Image (cartoon, coloured by chain):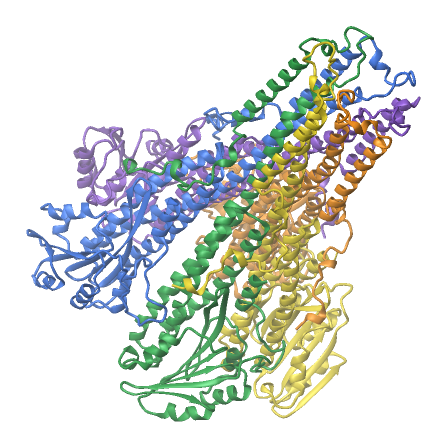
Chain colours: A blue, B purple, C orange, D yellow, E green
C-alpha cells in the first residue's frame, strides 16, 4: 500500500548495529549505493569542480590556501572509503556511525575540528512519492563535507550558484556554504507541504460530502505522516538554532543573520505542519459526525416509510379478518356497507397525509438537500460592516 | 466558496522565491499593486505631507534636523523602486525579501541602523470578507518607513492625529509613531473579533437547535480560521514584547509605557481567540450530541408506531387465517361468536392503550418538547442567595 | 436568555475607544453611574469617614501627617471628575483609560508614585445572577484610591473593620488596606464557586438520569462560563504574586506575609475552577454515552417486539393464503386438520417463548432497571481492608 | 451515595471564615473533636511519653536541654487551647488559621522560628471509605508540633520506632522526626492507591464486558476522585521539595538525603495517579465503543429477523389476496395449481436460506461470540523472537 | 490474561516495606533468586573473570592498582549478602533499599564514594512475553557494581567485548564500562519497540477491516502498556543526561561524548513511544468510526429490504380485505377485473423498481464494496510533480 510505503521512508527501518555492539561499528546496508566523491573548490575568483576516484585525492584541495572546498559524498555503500575519509577529516567514530546509520534525528554535535550537522531532506520524487533522505554535514574552517544516501537531492540550485562567477559564496567562507545547503533543504519543504495541503483539502471535501471507509484510512494515515513530519522538523529547527547560538569562529556573525532567516522559514514550516495536524485531527470528528448524519438519513427514510405503511397495513389486516357476518350483525358490518371500500381507502389516505404532515413539521422530509450550494457560510449571516463597533 | 477564500487570505499562497534561490531574491508578484510613496514630516510645531514621485526625493526629509519622517509605501509591485529605497535606508537584502514575500510571521529583527518590525493587519473590508495584510515597519532614529501590500488600511486615525496640531506625536520621537501604528493595528482586531463572536453565537444556536451538514462544515471552517488567527496573533504579541525589552536608544522608556498598554491589548485579543477556539471545539461535541439526539427522536417515533401496530397486525392476521370451522369445532370458533368482532377490536384497543401507557412511563411520548422556552437554566435551579454560605 | 446574560457580564462588551483613537481617550459609557466619592481617613487612634462633593476636597486628607486615606470612587460616569482625580493623584492617562474602559485583565502596573492594581470582583446579586465588576486600586505611600463601576460590592466587611477601633488596620499602612481589599475580593469567590458547584452537581445528576437538549445547552454554557472565570482568575493570582515580589517600599514585608496567604486562596480558587472545568468537560462525554444508552434502550424495545411478532405474523399470513384445497390434497391440508388452529396457536406461542428466552439470555429484557438504587459503587467491590497490603 | 461522600472528604466543605473577616479569625467547626495533647520527649538515651491536660504543661519539655519534643495535638475543637499553643510556639495568626480551616493545599511556609508544613494523609478507614485528613506540622529547632483533625492516623509505626530504644531517631534531630512523619504519610498512599487500582481493574472488566449506566456513573466518579487525589499529591511533592531546598539550619544535610528518598516516593505516587487518570479517561472511550457495539448487536438481530420474514410475509400476503379466479384465468391461477402450496413454501424456504447465506457472508450471524476466551492478544500475533532484528 | 501479565511486569506489585517502616529496611521477596556474584577484573593488558563464593572475596580485586573491577550480582534473595556488600562498598541504606525494592524509577543519586544509577532493561524473553528488569549500577572510581533481579539480561555483548583483548574498554576507566552497560540497555529497546510496532500495525489493520470487542480490549491494553513504557523511558533519558552533566571526576569528558550518543538513542526511543502512543490513541477514534460504519451498513440493509416490501405488503393486504362485492359495485371491483391480478403484480414491481432506483441514487446499494483494493490513497489524487510550485 502506498500510504505505508511513504511512512516507512520517513520513519522506520533505521539501519543500526546490533544492540550491544561496539560503539563506532558501521553497519553498511547490503543495498546501499556505492559512493561517489565530488569536489567543489573555490575562492574569490577561482572555481574548480572534480569527480574524485578515491578519498586520498581530497587532501591537496584542503591544503590550498584561501580556498573553500566542498567535498560531496553521494552513496554510503563502502565502509573502507568512509573510514578513510573519517581519518582525513578526523571524524569521531560515533559521528561516522551516525552518518551511516540513517535516519538519525537532526542535530548539531560540536567537535574540536568541526561542527557535525544532521539534516533531513524531503523530496517529491514523483506524483505520490514523498521521499526523505538524510544529509550529514561536517562544517570545518575551510571545508564542508556532506554525505548523502542517494544521488537525488535538492541542492542543484546551490551548485549552480557556486558555478556562476560572483555571488555571495565567493565573498563568504565555508559557513555560508553550509547555510546555503541548509536553506535549500528547508525551503524545499514548502512545495512538499503545499502539495500535502492540497491533498488534505481534497480529503476534507470527501469527508464532508461522501465519507467511506477508505476516507477513514486516509485520515488515519495522514495523521501518522504528519506526526512523522513533525518529529523531523522540530529538531531541524533546533539544529539551525544551535548554529546561530554557536560561539566558535566556525560560524561568523554575518552568516548568522542568514541563518536567522533560515530559522524563520523552519518556524513557518512547523506552523504549517501544526496547522495540518489540527485540521487532520478535526477531520476525524467531522468523519464521525458525517457517519452519524448518514445513519440519521437512513433511519429517516426507514421511519417515514414504515410509519406510514404500518398503520395502513393494520387496517387492511382488520378487514381481511374472517369474522362471519352471519353469526352476528356486529361482525364486521363495514364489509357490507355500500361505501365500505372507498371509505376504507379514504381513511387510509387521510392517515398517510396526516403522518406526512407530521414528518414535514418535524423537517424530516427534505432534510437531505441542504449541502450542495456553494456559499457555505452565506446564510449563517457573517458580520456586516454595520456591526463593526 | 467564501469560507475557503477567507482562509487563504490569512494563511496560504505566500509569495516566495524558488527553493534554493539566492537569498535576497525579490519575487514580485505579477498582480502586485504599483507602489506609491507618501511622506509625513513633522516636528514640534511643523507638519508637511507629500506624495513623492520617486524614492530619491526621500533623502531631503531625512536630513532635516529635528524632524520625524514617516515614509509610507503602499503597493509592492516595483522591484527597482524597492531596491532603491533599500539602498537609501540601508536595508539588509533579507529584510527586503521579507517585505516583498508576504505574508511572513510577525517578528522584530534588530539591525544596526533600525528595527525591522513585521505586523499583520486584519480588516473587515465588507460584510463577509475578513482581509489580512502585512505591514513592514522600519523604525530608525528619526524616521519610520512602512511598506503595505495594498491601499486599504486601518491607519487613517493615526494620520489624522498627525495632521492635527498638538497631540503626543509632536512631543515624542519616531518610536511613538511606530507605537501609534502598532496600536492602531492591534486595536483593529477588536471589532473584527467581536463580529466573529457574533457569528459564533449564531452558529452555536444553529448547532443546538437545527444542525445540518452545512453547520458541520461551518464549525470545521471556523476551527481552521481561528487556528490561523491564533498563529498570527501569538507572534504579534511577542513582537511588541521584543520592542518593550529592546535596550537600544531607538525605543525610549516613555514609549515603553505605551507599548506595555498595547501589549495588554494583544494579550486580551489572544484571550478572545483562545476562548473562541474552545467554544468552537466544544461546538463539535454539541453537534455530535445533537445528531445523537435526532437519531434518538427518529428512533422513538419509529418504535412507538411499530411497536403499537405490529402486535395488532398480528392479531388481525390470526383472524385472517382460513382454518376451516367445519373441520373441527376448535378451528377458530371466535369467528362465529356473537361479540367476536367487537371483542377483537376491544382487545386491540386495550393493547394499544397499554403500550402507550408503557411508553408514557418511559417518557418517550412528549420528549421532544423541552427546548423552545427561553430561561434555559431556570429550572435547573441556579444557586440562591440562601445557600451562599 | 439568562445563561447568555451571565456570560456577557463576565466577558463581552468591553467599553473601549475607537480603534486608532488617541491613547488616554476616556470613552465614558452613556449609562455609567454618576460617581460618588467617599473618604476614610485613619491613623492609630483616629478615624474619619466623609462623603465628598468634589475631587478637590481630597487634598487636605492626603496632606494630614500619619494618616492613611482611602478614597473610594463608586461610579465612572463623569469624565471631568475622573480627570481631576487623575491630576491630583498624578495618574498616567493610560491608567485612567484602563479604569474607565472596564473590564480589563487583572494586572499590576508600576508607576513612580503608586502601584496600579486592577482586580475583578464576583458577586451573587440574586439567585441566578452572577455579577462581575472591575475594581481599580491605586496604592500610594499613604493612600489607597479605588474606582468601582457600581455601588454594590463585597467590601463592606473591610469598611466595618476600619470603623471598629483597634484591629490590624490601625497598626499597618496603606499596603495592609490594599491587601484587605484584595483579600475580601478573593475570598468572595468561594461562596460563588460553591454555589456554582452545587449547580454542577444537579447538572451531573440530570445528565446521567434524564438528559434532554436543555441539559446539552446547559453543559455547553457551563463550559464557557468556567472558561471565562478562569480567564479572570489566572491573572488575578499573578497580580497578587506581582505585589509579593514588589521590592519597592510601597509593600512592606509584614504585609507580604498576608499577601502570601491571599495568594494561597487564589490558588485554591483556581484549583476549584480547574476541577469544575474537568468535571464539565467529562459531563459532555457522559451526555454522549447517555444518549447512546437511550438509543440502545429504544432499539431494544423495538427489537424485542418486532422480532417476536414478525415471525408470528408470517405464520398467520401463511394460513391466510387462499390456496384452493380442492385443486390438490397438498394445498394447505393443515386448514382441514381437526387440531389445526390450536396447533397453529401453540406453535406461535412456542416461538414467542423461545425468542423471549433468547432475549433473556442476552440480558435485554430487564436491562433498564439497574440505576435507581443508592450505593452506586457498592457491588463493584471497593477495596476492603483485607487487601491493604 | 457513597461515591459522593468519598469525594467530599477529599475536596469540599472546607471550613473557612466569612469572606472579608479579619485575617487570623479561627472558625472552629461545631462538630470538631475536642483536642488532646500528647507529648513525646527523647534524647540519645532517654524517652518520655505523656498525655497533657493543658498547653502550659508543654513549656518544661521545650526547655529541657538536648531533648527533642514532639507535641501532638489531635482534635481542633477548642479555640482557646489552640490560641494558647499559638502563643507558646509563637505561631503567626495566619498559620493558626490554616491549621483550623482544613483542608488547605499542602505547602511549606517559612517563619523565623519554625517551618510550617501542611500535608494530607489518606487512610482506608474501612472497606469502601477512603478518608483524607490534614496534618499541620511545625518544625522548630528542638521540637515538632503536629495538629490533626481526628484520632485516626497512619503515624503509629513512627511512634513505635520512637518508643523502641536505638534507631535513627535517637541520633538525629527534630528534622528527622519531621521526615519520619512525612515519609509515613507518603508511604501510606501506596496501599490506598493499590486498592484503588484493583477497583479500576474491576471497572475496566465491567466496561468491556457488561457496561450499564451504573458503570458510566462509576467511571465519571473515578475521574473526579483521581482529579482530587492529583490536586492533593502535586503540592505534597512540592512541599517535600521545598524542604530539600531549605537552606536554614532547621533541615540538616543528612536528613535531606532521606527527604530525597521520600520525594522519589511522592513522584512514584504521582506517576500512579497519572496512569490511573489516563486509564480512567480511556475507559470512557471504551464505554462509548461498548455502547456502540451493543447497538450494533441489537440492530443485527432485528435486521436478520426482519429482513428474512418481511419478504416471506409479503409472499403470504400476495396469496392472501382475493382476486376472483372466475373473473379471468390470469387472476391468481397459482392458487389452483396442484403443487401450488408446496411450491410456495419451497420458494419461501429458498429465500430464507439465501438471506441467511447473505448474512453469513457478511459475518453477522455469529459475531457476538468473540470475547469470552482468555488469551486476549494471542491470535493478534505478538512479535516472536525471530523478528527481533 | 497475557496482556495483563505483561503490564504487571512493567508496573505493578512493587516490593516495598510496610508504610512507616524504618528507612533502610530490606523487604526481600520470598521468591527472590539466590544471588550469585561474578567478577570481571581488567586493565590495559590483563583480564580475569571469577565466580565468587562470598562478598568478602571482592576486596582483593578492588585493591589491585590499575585494575577496573566489575562486580556483577545476579539475584537479590539474600539480605545478609546484600548488607555485607553494602558495607564493603559503603552503600547508603536507602540506596540498598532501592536496589531490593524493585522496580524503582530510573534515576541517578550522588553519593560521596560513587554514583548510584537505576535503569530498567526491557527483554523479549519469548514470543509474547515482554519482560522488564531493574538493574542497579554503582559507579566508583575503579569499580562498577551491578545488581540484577534475575539471570537473564542483555549485557552478554558487553561481557564478550571485555573478554576480547583490545577494544576501548581496555583504554578507558570504569565510567566507560558503566556507559557500555547503559548503552546495551538502551539499544535493546529498539528490537522490542520494533516488534511492538509490528503488533500495532496488525492491530490497525484489524481495527479498520474487522473490528471486534477483542480489538477494543487490545487497543485499550496497548494504550496502557505504552503509558507504562513511557513512564520508564522518560526518567531513563534524564538519568543519562544527569551523568553527562555530572561534574565530578567519576565521569570523564571522553566518556561524556559516548553518553551523548547514548542520550540521542534514548531520545529516539522516546520519539518512537510517543509516536506509538498517538497512533494507538487515534486507533480508538478509528474503532468508533468503524463501529459507526457497521451500524450504518446494517441499517442500510434493513432499510432497503423493509422499505421495499412494506408498501408491497400493504397492497397485498388491501386486496386481502373481505369487502363484499355484492353489497356495492364500489366494493373492490378490482378483484373482478380481467387483468386485475397481473396489473396488481405489475404495480408492485414498478414500486419496487422505483424504490431501488431511489436507493441507487442515494448510493446505498453498493456502498460496502469500497475497501479491499490496495492503493488506498490512489484516487484521492496525491499531489503530482506538476503542482510542485
Q: Quadrant of residue B34?
A: top left
Asked if residue C215 lies left or right of residue C264, the reply is: right
Quadrant in which the N terminus of chain B is drawn: top left
Asked if residue A86 lies left or right of residue A352, the reply is: left
Indicate whether B40 appears above or below C107.
Answer: above
Q: Between E165 and B126, which is closer to the camera in this rendering?
A: E165
Residue D92 shows up from this direction: no
Q: Between A5 and C349, which is closer to the camera in this rendering?
A: C349
Indicate whether C134 appears above or below A204.
Answer: below
Residue C302 shows up from this direction: yes
Asked if residue A107 lies left or right of residue A350, the reply is: left
Q: How many numbered marks have been drawn onto this rendered protein structure? A: 0
Q: Position of residue D31 (x, y in %)?
A: 78, 64
Q: Quadrant of residue B340?
A: top right
Q: Position of residue A79 (x, y in %)?
A: 22, 64
Q: Between B334 and D74, which is closer to the camera in this rendering?
A: B334
Q: Residue at x 67, y 13 (%)?
A: D330
Q: Quadrant of residue E19?
A: bottom right
Q: Residue at x 56, y 82 (%)?
A: E24
Q: Position of residue D153 (x, y in %)?
A: 69, 73
Q: Position of residue C96 (x, y in %)?
A: 48, 43
Q: Between C144 and A222, which is closer to the camera in this rendering?
A: A222
Asked if residue D318 lies left or right of residue C77, the reply is: right
Amino acid at each position: 500500500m502506498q500510504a505505508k510505503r511513504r511512512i516507512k521512508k520517513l520513519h522506520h527501518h533505521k539501519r543500526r548495529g546490533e544492540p550491544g555492539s561496539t560503539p563506532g561499528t558501521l553497519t553498511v546496508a547490503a543495498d546501499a549505493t556505492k559512493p561517489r566523491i565530488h569536489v567543489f573548490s573555490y575562492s574569490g575568483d577561482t572555481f574548480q569542480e572534480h569527480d574524485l576516484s578515491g578519498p586520498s585525492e581530497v587532501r591537496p584541495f584542503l591544503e590550498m590556501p584561501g580556498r573553500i572546498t566542498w567535498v560531496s559524498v553521494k552513496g554510503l555503500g563502502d565502509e573502507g572509503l568512509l573510514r578513510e575519509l573519517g581519518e582525513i577529516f578526523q571524524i569521531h567514530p560515533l559521528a561516522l556511525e551516525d552518518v551511516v546509520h540513517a535516519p538519525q534525528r537532526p542535530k548539531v554535535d560540536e567537535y574540536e575540528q568541526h561542527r557535525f550537522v544532521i539534516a533531513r531532506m524531503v523530496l517529491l520524487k514523483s506524483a505520490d512519492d514523498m521521499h526523505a533522505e538524510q544529509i550529514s554535514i561536517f562544517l570545518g574552517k575551510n571545508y564542508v563535507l556532506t554525505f548523502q544516501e542517494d544521488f537525488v537531492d535538492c541542492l542543484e540550485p546551490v551548485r549552480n550558484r557556486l558555478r556562476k562567477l560572483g555571488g555571495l559564496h565567493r565573498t563568504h567562507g565555508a559557513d555560508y556554504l553550509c547555510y546555503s545547503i541548509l536553506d535549500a533543504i528547508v525551503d524545499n519543504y514548502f512545495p512538499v507541504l503545499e502539495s500535502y495541503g492540497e491533498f488534505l483539502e481534497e480529503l476534507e471535501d470527501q469527508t464532508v460530502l461522501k465519507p467511506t471507509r477508505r476516507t477513514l484510512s486516509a485520515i488515519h494515515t495522514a495523521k501518522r505522516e504528519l506526526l512523522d513530519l513533525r518529529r523531523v522538523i522540530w529538531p531541524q529547527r533546533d539544529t539551525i538554532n544551535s548554529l546561530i547560538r554557536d560561539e566558535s569562529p566556525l560560524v561568523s556573525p554575518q552568516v548568522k543573520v542568514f541563518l536567522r532567516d533560515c530559522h524563520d522559514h523552519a518556524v513557518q514550516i512547523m506552523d504549517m505542519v501544526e496547522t495540518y495536524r489540527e485540521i487532520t485531527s478535526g477531520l476525524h470528528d467531522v468523519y464521525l459526525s458525517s457517519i452519524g448524519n448518514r445513519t440519521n438519513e437512513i433511519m429517516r427514510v426507514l421511519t417515514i416509510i414504515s410509519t406510514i405503511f404500518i398503520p395502513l397495513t393494520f387496517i387492511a389486516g382488520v378487514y381481511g379478518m374472517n369474522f362471519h357476518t352471519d353469526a352476528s350483525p356486529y361482525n364486521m358490518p363495514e364489509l357490507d356497507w355500500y361505501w365500505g371500500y372507498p371509505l376504507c381507502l379514504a381513511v387510509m389516505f387521510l392517515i398517510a397525509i396526516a403522518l406526512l404532515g407530521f414528518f414535514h413539521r418535524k423537517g424530516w422530509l427534505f432534510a437531505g438537500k441542504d449541502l450542495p450550494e456553494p456559499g457555505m457560510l452565506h446564510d449563517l449571516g457573517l458580520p456586516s460592516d454595520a456591526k463593526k463597533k
